[in-house]
Image: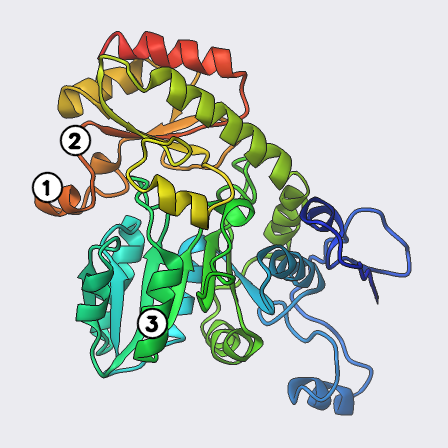
Amino acid sequence: MTEHRDPDYRLETRLVHEGQLRTPFGETSEALFLTQGFVYESAESAERRFLNEEPGYSYSRYSNPTIDMFERRMASLEGAETARATASGMAAVTAAMMSQVQAGDHVVAARGLFGSCRWVVEDLLPRFGVACTLVDGIDLGAWRKAVRPETRAFLLETPSNPSLQIIDIAAVARIAREAGAMLTVDNVFATPLYQKPLALGADCVVYSATKHIDGQGRCLGGVILGSTEFVETKVQQFLRMTGPSISPFNAWVLLKGLETLSLRVERQTANAGFLADSLHDHPKLKDLIYPGREDHPQAELIRRQMSGGSTMIALDVKGGKEAAFRFMNALRLIRISNNLGDAKSLVTHPATTTHQRFAPELRAEMGISDGLVRLSVGLEHREDLLADLVDALETA
């Protein structure tokens, strides 16, 4: 196989071409290698391959040409030294965190996390002797106060799911460095286009590639990005031995999704901005939160940290759960789903789905009211989306 090497092209070009490996057949589209294993020219070659003394592939749980292309392209997009793909976004979060800690260590995490991410740090890690402290991610003093001598890892997501709070990555990264801890950032809501955590001082970035990277509701996937030292030693060993591997087919689908990522996200963001401006003063809404508006509580930080708004809007419907349900059920074009980042616009009621396991007081701490509806804006015509939302709000 020959590697397609690009000069320092701009992001949109790299999304189409970066990391491509071509076979002697000279295919235009990236090749899909649906194979579990690989053969060797000799027993000596197999030995050298397993000792990492000879380049090549040995088993698709460890590496695969199609997966390799997806990882290379993601690393280029993120500005990371290297990347490893996983079977899902939660596999990426779990592997990234488990690779950093051992019994006796301590993790500090922001409260405003996706429900499954909080389960990893609150429930899973303590089973293996790793303590956890949850803090208000916006409060930098809380991060400093939570640090212990045994603190080894920080975890946050920004914008947060689903309340769209913004955490100062650069400031938290400084606190983590002073504590001798690694900072991992879940960058799903910002997408790789609008926020660069590694450039802001983070050590590791994770994605659910299921969301914007696929963007068309087809498959699951996740990515871990960071330094060669961290990813190829600690993360690779964890993935190799525990097996949360992405399939070559899913990696190929995600690779093709990257080709249109900027087009899709830019259109979705433009639609989201239009809807946020159009609905902000609607009488049936208690609040509307959108990172692209100047009235966002952290608008100044957003200008410093992000290069674009978001495809996500948080709508707090007056009347609580009952009104939110009436609104959601009245939608005709926009569908109810717990996914996001899709070409189709989707709504979710976090209090009864993604964050339902938390007690009401904990949801309140995370900014999740009973009336909160998370809207993931898609590629439909913006006027059709607005008409659907306005009509449904009239029933709330």
Q: Quadrant of the N terminus?
A: bottom right
Mark 3–mark 1 Cα distance, whole angstroms, equals: 30 Å
Judging depth in this view, the residue of 198 and 103 nearest the camera is 198
**Which of disc 2 and disc 1 is earlier in sequence?**
1
Give the position of the C terminus as an image quadrant. Answer: top left
Under mark 2, the amino acid is Asp
The reply to whether callout 1 and callout 2 are in contact (CB within 8 Å) is yes
| Badge 1 density bin: few <14, some 14–19, many ≥20, Cα 10 Å | some
Q: Identify the residue position indicated by label 1 in the image.
A: 360
Q: Closest to the observer: 374 or 333?
A: 374
Q: Tag 2, which secondary structure?
A: loop
Q: Is 127 located above or below residue 10 in the figure?
A: below
Q: Earlier in the sequence, mark 2 or mark 3?
A: 3
Residue beneath label 3, please?
A: 176
Label placed on residue 370 = 2
Which residue is pictured at 37% across the width and 75% down the height?
177
Which mark is drawn over residue 87? Answer: none
The number of discs equals: 3
Q: CA distance from mark 1 to mark 2?
A: 9 Å
Q: Taking 192 as reference, is 289 left or right? A: left
